[in-house]
Image (tube, coloured by chain):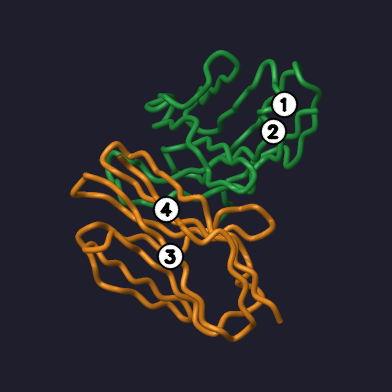
Amino acid sequence: AQKVTQAQTEISVVEKEDVTLDCVYETRDTTYYLFWYKQPPSGELVFLIRRNSFDEQNEISGRYSWNFQKSTSSFNFTITASQVVDSAVYFCAMKTSYDKVIFGPGTSLSVIP
Amino acid sequence: EAGVVQSPRYKIIEKKQPVAFWCNPISGHNTLYWYRQNLGQGPELLIRYENEEAVDDSQLPKDRFSAERLKGVDSTLKIQPAELGDSAVYLCASSLDQSRARNTEAFFGQGTRLTVV
């Protein structure tokens, strides 16, 4: 089965707190790609990061960091020192061998000033 | 560079009426996707085009939904007749040629919010 799970439906944090969004994926493919997208209230999905299954190196981009662990089939996303502008719905997604992109249900993040 | 453009942004129609959505992908992107996003859920693929060919339409409800991308550039998605359950956001996305670079990400438009009453 191909599946992406984001167990956290909604998260609220106070500004400047760190927050981690969880993503667990399920696939039997050996080659696959993982993505994170942000969907602000305007509705447009904004691409944040892509990872392929052969690259487990973690990545940091400013206040954003991603932790990819194949052993636990997880691709978690951490925002450090959160800001109000980070409030959005965040989607984890996976592309498998059939080029089908499967999205998780999303995590709604509210950053309170 | 212009992103993916969709129109209209919002549409309200009565059930059993037809409706059409339009999408213009990013210039040079051969792959075009239509997704449907229900409230509180992630997007679900309806159809994927490589140029003008629909290579994956397995999730498209073909009894009432149709799509076309005649010249391999812009695309329209049609629903006829619309049902109450079709109320959702319809998202268009595009990416570089999937057959050449499978790891490319998709870029999304702002979507069309459809309300069927």
Q: Quick one: SS at disc 3?
A: loop
Q: Chain of mark 2?
A: B
Q: Please name the amino acid that badge 4 sits on.
A: Thr
User: Picture coordinates of residue A40 (x, y %)?
Assistant: 63, 60
* Left or right of residue A53, residue A65 in this image: right
Same chain under badges 4 and 2? The reply is no
Same chain under badges 4 and 1? The reply is no
Residue in the image at 40% along x and 60% along y: A23
Distance of mark 4 from mark 1, alpha carbons? 28 Å
Residue in the image at 26% along x and 40% along y: A97
Same chain under badges 3 and 4? The reply is yes
Q: Which residue is mark 4?
A: A5
* Chain coloured orange here: A
Label placed on residue B84: 1
Quadrant location, the C terminus of chain B: top right
Q: Quick one: SS at disc 2?
A: loop
Q: Quick one: SS at disc 1?
A: helix
Do the CB atoms of the residues marked 1 and 2 lie less than 8 Å apart?
yes
Q: Quick one: SS at disc 4?
A: strand
Q: Please name the amino acid that badge 1 sits on.
A: Leu
- How many C-alpha atoms fall within 10 Å of the one at disc 3: few (<14), some, or many (≥20)? some
Quadrant location, the N terminus of chain B: bottom right
Do the CB atoms of the residues marked 4 and 1 lie less than 8 Å apart?
no
Residue in the image at 70% along x and 22% along y: B83
Same chain under badges 3 and 1? The reply is no
Do the CB atoms of the residues marked 2 and 3 lie less than 8 Å apart?
no
Compared to residue B12, the image places residue A104 above or below, namely below
Along the line of sight, the residue nearer the viewer: A87 or A60: A87
Distance of mark 3 from mark 4, alpha carbons? 8 Å
User: Picture coordinates of residue A4 (x, y %)?
Assistant: 39, 50
Return the disc, 3 or 4, that comes first in the chain's sequence. Answer: 4
Mark 4 vs mark 2, foreground winner is 4
